[in-house]
Structures are given as C-alpha cells and as structure tokens.
Amino acid sequence: MLEIRNLTKSYGDVLALDRFSLDLKKGEVLGLLGPNGAGKTTLISILAGTLRDFTGTVTFDGRNLFADRGLKNRLGIVPQDMAFYDELNAMDNLLFWGGLYDVPRAELKRRAAAILELVELSGRAKEPVKNFSGGMKRRLNTAIGLLHKPDLLLLDEPTVGIDVQAKVSILEIIRSVGAAGTAIVFTTHQLAEVETTCSRIAIMDHGRILAQGTLDELIRIVGERDIVEITGEFPAAAFSEALQGLAGGRVELLSASDNQAHLAVAATEEIPRIMDLLFRRKLAVTDLKIKTPGLETVFLKLTGRSLRD
Amino acid sequence: MRRAALILLNDVRRHLKAPAVILIFIAIPLAMTALIGIIFAPKTEGSKLPPIPVLIVDNDKGLASKLLVSSFDVDQMKEMFQATVTEEADGRARMSKGKASAMVVIPKGFTLDLLEAKPVTLLVVKNPAEQFLPDIVEEFMATMAVMLSGVVQAFAEEVRGVRAMIDLPVGAMPWESLAPELGKAQKKIAAASKYLDPLLLRLKEEETQAAGARPRITASHLFSEILPGMAVMFLLFIVQTLMRDLLTDREDGKLRRMATTPLRPLELIGARLAGGWFMGLAVLLVMAGVGALAFRVRVGPLGLYLLLAAVISFWTAAFFALFHALVRNRNQAGALGAPIILAFSIFGGSMINVEAMPKAFRAIGIVTPNRWYIDGAALVREGRFPAASLVVLLVSGLVLLALAVPALRRRTTE
C-alpha cells in the first residue's frame, strides 16, 4: 500500500533522513521505534505534507502521495500535539475536521456520533474541550484522525503524557482500526506499546532503519542470550579493556558508557568470570541486573544506547 | 471554496464563543472617546465658551463702583462672565490658586474721582496660567472704562452740580437746586433715548464659510472627531489578534493536521484573510453604531462609510497576513505587534491631532493607515467621497496581499 524509497531530508548539516525506505501493507500496524533525533517526526511531517526540500519518492497504491490531492482523503494523522480547537466542543471539532474531507454532511454526523462512542466521549460531546482531562483530549485527538476512515493512519506518539487507563484505551482503538484494514505507522518511545500493539516493528536511528521485522525476528538478532547490565564507577574505556581477556564469543559487549555497560552472555555462569576480570582491574561495581532478551536489548545492540538516551 | 468557507465559519464561531478579547478591544476605544469627549466637550450645544470666572473687588463701595459691579448682573453679561464680589485679600488668595481668570480691583475713591472728572484707574489682575480668557476680561473692562468716561463727560455739568452737594449732610442738601440739575440730565437722556431705544445700530452675528474653517465645536462634533482615530487603532489590535491563527496553527500542530486533508494552502490562507477582513469590518460597524447611539457620533452617508470601513479592514487583514508570515513565533508576534500598532497610531493621528504635530511627524503619518482612515472619515462625515484615502489604502493593501500570499504559502510547508 505505502512505498517509501530513498527519502532524504537535511536541516543544514544535519541529516534527518538518510535514504530512508519502507514498505507498508494494508492492515499492517508498523511500530517505528527510535530515540530522540532518529528522524521519526521528520518522516511523519514529510508524509503529512508539511515539509519540503527532500528527495525520494512516496507512493500510495502506486500513486505519488504528494501529487495526487485526492489521496489526501485516504490519509489520516494523529499528531503528537493536541491539534484541535479548545474553544469548541468535541462534536464541533469532529464536524469541522471531518468537514475538510469529502464526506457528506449527514454521514459525517453519523460517524462523529459513532466515533465518540468508540473513544468513550459520547457523554461529553457538547462540552468545551478546554474542560477535558489530558486523557480525554488524547482520545479526541485520536478520534479526529479516524473520523473519515483513512486507509493509512500516521500516529505520532499518540499516548504521550496520559494515564495508563487512557493509554490502554487508545492502544485498543489502534489495534481495532488495524484489524479493520487500515495501515498504521505508529511512532513511539514506549517499548511495551510497540510489543503489544504492532504487527511489525522498525528500529530507526540517524535517519535510517537499522532493523525491522516481527518482535520474534528482532529478538533473534541478539540471540537467545541473557543481557547483563553492570553499573558502577568506571570509565567506559577501562571496562572495554578489562573484558578483552574474554575469548570464545560467549560474552558480547553490547554497549559501554561511563559507569554502565551491557553484555550479552550465553549463560549466567559467565558472570563470575566477568566480575573477576573487573575486580582485578579495580573497577568498582555497585549493581548488576540480568534481563531476558527483549526489544530493549535489540535496541541497545543496534543503536548502542538505551531508548531513553 | 467549500473548505475555505468551512474554515471561515469555524473561525467566526470560535471567536464568538470566546469574545472577551474582541469585546474589550471594542469597549476601550468607545470608553476613551466618551472620556475625552466628556472632559473637553462644551457644556451646552451651540455655546461658544463657558462663563469666564471673574473676581471683583470693590474698595470704593460708592455709587459708580456699585453701578460697575451691577453691570455684571445683566443677563447678557452673565452668559459671558461668572462674577464674584470679594475682598482684596481673599481675591488675591483665590487668584494664586487659579480659581479665576481675572480680578478687577475698583480703587477707593473711584466714585468721587469720577464725579470730579479726575483720572481713575481700574486694576485688572490676570491669571498667568490662562491664555485668552483674562484678555477678554481686560478688553471688557477697557470698553467699560471708555463707556464710563463717555457718560461722565456727557453729563459733566450735571455731575459737577451733584458733586457739590454730595458731601453735604442730607438735611442740609439744597433739594431745590437738585431739580434743575436732574431736569437738564433728563433732557439729555431723552435726547439720547431715540438713539438708545429702539437701537438704531445693532449687532448681528454671522458665521463665515472660509475655506478650511472648522465648524463650531459641539459635543457631537468632538465625539465624531475622536472616534475614528480610536476605532482604527483598536481595529489594528483586533485584527492582529484574530489573524494570529496563522501562527498558532503551525505551533499547535493544527497546520500539520490540515496539511493531511485535501485542503489547499491557498484555501486556508484565503479563509484566514477573509475572516480578518470581515470581522474587522463588523467591529468597525459595531463601534460606529454604538458611537451613533450613545454619543450622537455622525459617520456621514452610510454607503460611503461602509466603503471606507471595508477598505481599511482589507488593508489591516493584508498587513497582518504579511506580518504573521514574517515573524517566527507567537512571542515575536507579541513583541513586535503592539509597538508597530502604537507607532502607526501616534504618527497617524489616532492619539494626537495631526495638526498639532511637528512637520516631521506629519510626514511620517502619511505611511500609516490611521492617517488615511481618519482623513477619509472626516470627508465622509461632510458627505464627500474620500477618493485619496480609498485609493491609497486599496493599492497598498493589494501590494501587501501580493507579498503575504507567497510568504504564507512558504510558511505552510517548512
């Protein structure tokens, strides 16, 4: 359905998207995972049509997304900002934003009532939005993006700043919309959201996709190895040097920064050897954690940093 | 077009739901007009000047001084002067506090000196803080002095006769000698009466129609003069506020949402411009309507006024479209917008009458919309077509629009 080829965008000397390419099928929910500055918002902005001066192509069902204005009726967005008018009530917001698409008025009203029901705001339809809680506003923000039943939906961190209950509600809506056949691109920092909501995950950094696939496929990148997180008081270089004595490939250094490092180990029996090497070098260790392989470890291996960095 | 109309109607609805800012911007110029008008407007319609406060000190308390004092009690004099008789010390104290425009001091011996045809001096003390009211008092007293001198000289013989008797005790007064003197005076008065009643020489007041002369100031005139300047200043503030959506849409993510719809950038820009234009026009009409009802403000022929109001609103919308295309964010818009509007208003004559400004300021005022609107409104009040104002505002507005549209198009995509 959606084909992105060699999308490149710079802001001065900074390369925000570096020959970015991606395919998306109908009904697929793609989670786009990446740290700040990875290029996620730049990608969404290009697809939304608010950025210019880029190279590459984007086709939607074989047609140029930016040349064919009619395709806009099939595209929807849930931006990270609360993009609606606080002075109006929920119903008026839906009718206004939905009215910008080619949906007949009577049908629009019917859909607005139905979508308010879906996001559990039908009882507050006539209240000014400025009186809504953060979670309610996020639900309305999502509802506006769904009103015209888009075939492609772009969600830019749709659950930022809301409570768990509201988050669960929005994620459930996203799953149901995907199951109904809408292709979804969903950017987020939250690993748990991606793991539970997306049928495919792409890890992105420095404007490129580093890896993509299902959760199981991505985890296989790091193998069936446990991840050891060591925290202490040591410089990164000293830590890396200390582990050079390890041979055999049963221990892999995933990342090392000052005072923290991550290792993938074939078995937890490797841990005493690691600690012995660190103590010989007089490197102080204050904490040690063992984690089972997951998206976080995949991210760590691919980017060399954690998602919060 | 449908989408543009939808955005326009939505913007109007939004602003009507949160009208506080607009209502305040409408109320302020009306309140300022009312305040200035009430302070400076004449107390009665058609009157020239308020009565001039004059203090009179009668140190003589004789016949002639009492006649002089009583002349201020005549109806015609009461319209011109508000005379208060007082003692000299009190009079000087009041003058030092600026309580009167002038003080007339009748010296002791005034009556006797007059009767003896000796020179006598009236003292007029003027309030230095006032420019021309004390001069009016001085001129009046000079006229009274001439009249008194004339009377004394006309009745000199009779006065001499009376003067000889005036120092005598009442019982010793030769009444039989008084009668011939009074008879002679009466004959003179009778002879003069045909010149006095009916008056053969009358005064008639007539206003000239000199070119450029301004009409007599009435309360309604004053409000009509003040309101256009205030209205255009606050029109600028209102339209700036209304068109800030051009910026906030970008900052709040609404523009990104709009960009994913079939809405074209030109439709969005057109809708915002039209909104600023129509709402600005509506605000001007409301101000004019309230001004007419509350302050009897005259706007002139309605068709001409509507035309001028439409053109100034168009100019303002075009200007702020360009303004919001050039500033980077809301903070910058807030920091720059108010000083620009105030500069327009000061140099353009919204705050100070253009004629009272230095030449250089008047020259700068030509580049402000305020100046052209105020001048145009003055012509419309007189029933004349404000051609120059319309042409200047329309042409410059079109130039601003031509610059604004491509700049805004660029700002809809980064």
Image (tube, grey):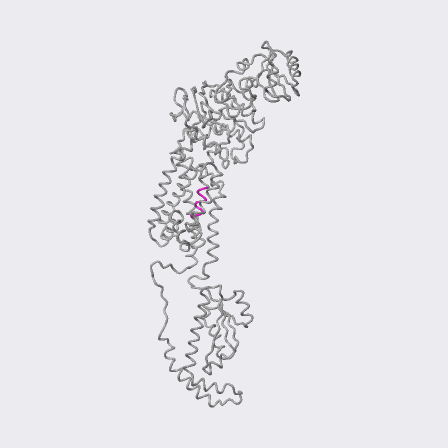
Instruction: Indicate yes or no whether the magenta region holds residue B108.
Output: no
Any part of residue B208 in sight: yes
Instruction: Indicate yes or no whether the magenta region holds residue B234.
Output: yes
Tell me the quarter of the image containing the N terminus of chain A. top left
* Residue A227 spot, x, y in % from top left: 60, 16
* Residue A84 spot, x, y in % from top left: 49, 33
Q: Nearer the viewer, residue B369 or A274?
A: A274
Decide whether the magenta segment is chiefly helix, strand or loop.
Answer: helix
* Residue B146 spot, x, y in % from top left: 42, 76
Q: Nearer the viewer, residue B164 or B284?
A: B164
Query: Residue A66 lies in what quarter of the image?
Result: top left
- As displayed, is residue A248 above or below residue B192? above
Question: In the image, is A169 to the left or to the right of B232?
Answer: right
Residue bounds of the magenta highlight: B232-240
Query: Residue A294 lies in what quarter of the image?
Result: top right
- As displayed, is residue A139 above or below residue A62? below
